[in-house]
Image (tube, rainbow, N blue to C red):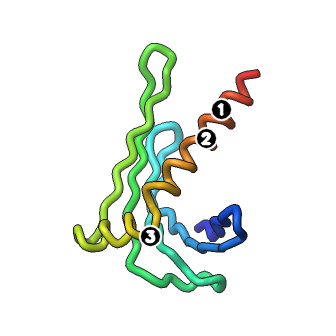
Amino acid sequence: HRFYAMVSPEGQEHWAIQQYTSINPKANFKYLNAFADKDANPSLPGSDWDLNFSEENGITNVKISIYNESLERMEQMIEMGFQGGFTMTLNELDNLLAALKK
């Protein structure tokens, strides 16, 4: 599992825990992701994540599917800032990959 904090520029902490349920090297991994308190106790129902990797013409593609127990739960995640946070994460990944190419 993985336990981590997402820290805003203002220093506000949001904790999360991931429990990996399946890992297939170079192809796929799955995990349950949930918000948690600072002691790793899940605070809300989690989401099931399924990440699949493929390659075409030397380009790696990643398909991310996120499953929630209900539409209401997904809407709650969006209200809590999921979309902005996830977009920021992907932008940081782009920056990291660009730096590694140099």
Foreground mark, 2 or 3?
3
Which mark's residue is nearer the viewer, 3 or 1? 3
- The spot of residue 89 in percent (x, y) is 57, 49
Q: Which mark is residue 93?
A: 2
Classify 38 as above or below 29: below
The outermost residue toward the left is 71
Q: Which residue is mark 3?
A: 80
* Image quarter of residue 46: bottom left
Which amino acid, by three-letter code, is at mark 2? Leu
Label 1 crowd bin: few (<14), some (14–19), many (20+), radius 10 Å:
few
* Residue shown at 41% from the left, 42% from the top: 52
The correct choice, above or below, for 12 with respect to 91 in the image is below
Q: What kind of residue is marked 1?
A: Leu
Q: Earlier in the sequence, mark 2 or mark 3?
A: 3
Q: Which residue is mark 1?
A: 97
Residue 34 x %, y %: 47, 72
